[in-house]
Amino acid sequence: MTTVNKTAETLNEGIANMMAGAKEDYIKWSTSGGKELSGYSKEQVDNWDKKTKISQGKKYIKIVQDTGVFCFIVKEDFKHFKKGDILKAAGYNAPALNSARGNVLAGNYPIQWTGPLYLK
């Protein structure tokens, strides 16, 4: 797990910060135990940014990493969510609406290379 402490002025900047944190977490995970980044792991890191796709929807921005949904970002305040809230995926086209896992604009949230953390 990596904590993203950076705040952001725009959603795009916040998404870039979040994905940089996820990439950092992948590097930490891949090199745990003192191993050097090589082979498949090095290739994953080298291609990380190219494998990240961002899709604009009506209410959410969908972040897809490789072939799976990484998370959804709330575009505008609604119900109990704020602009920039990070939502876990409930499926490929819909977020889980139980609770936000952080906010890309406010910073100070945990992230893993596999996506936002589950609620405790």
Image (tube, rainbow, N blue to C red):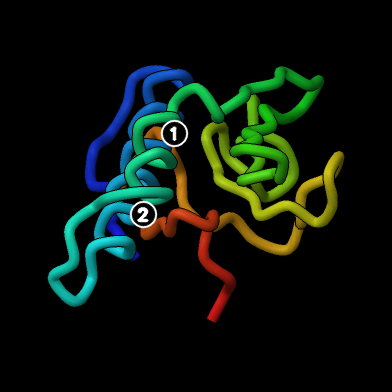
Residue in the image at 23% along x and 46% along y:
5
Residue 44: x, y in percent? 43, 41
At label 1, the amino acid type is Trp
Residue placed furthest toward the bottom = 120
> Residue 48 bears which disc, if any?
1
Q: Please, what secondary structure does the residue beneath circle 2 have?
A: helix
Binning the other alpha carbons within 10 Å of mark 2 as few (below 14), some (14 to 19) or many (20 upward) gives many
| Mark 1–mark 2 CB contact (< 8 Å) | yes
Q: Quadrant of residue 83?
A: top right
- The number of numbered badges drawn on the structure is 2
Q: Alpha-carbon neighbours of circle 1 within 10 Å: few (<14), some, or many (≥20)? A: some
State the image quarter where residue 82 is shown: top right
Residue picked out by circle 2: 26
User: Which residue is situated farthest in the left direction here?
Assistant: 34
Q: Is residue 4 left or right of residue 87?
A: left
State the residue in front, 103 or 64: 64
Q: Residue at x 38, y 50 (%)?
A: 41
Q: Does residue 57 appear left or right of residue 37 in this picture?
A: right
Q: Do we see residue 18 in this rendering? A: no
Residue 86 as seen in the image, left or right of residue 18: right
Q: CA distance from mark 1 to mark 2?
A: 10 Å
The image quadrant where one finds the N terminus is bottom left
Above or below — where is 47 with respect to 111? above
| Camera-side residue of 86 and 45 | 45
Q: Residue at x 67, y 27 (%)?
A: 61
Position of residue 72 in the picture relative to residue 50 (left or right): right
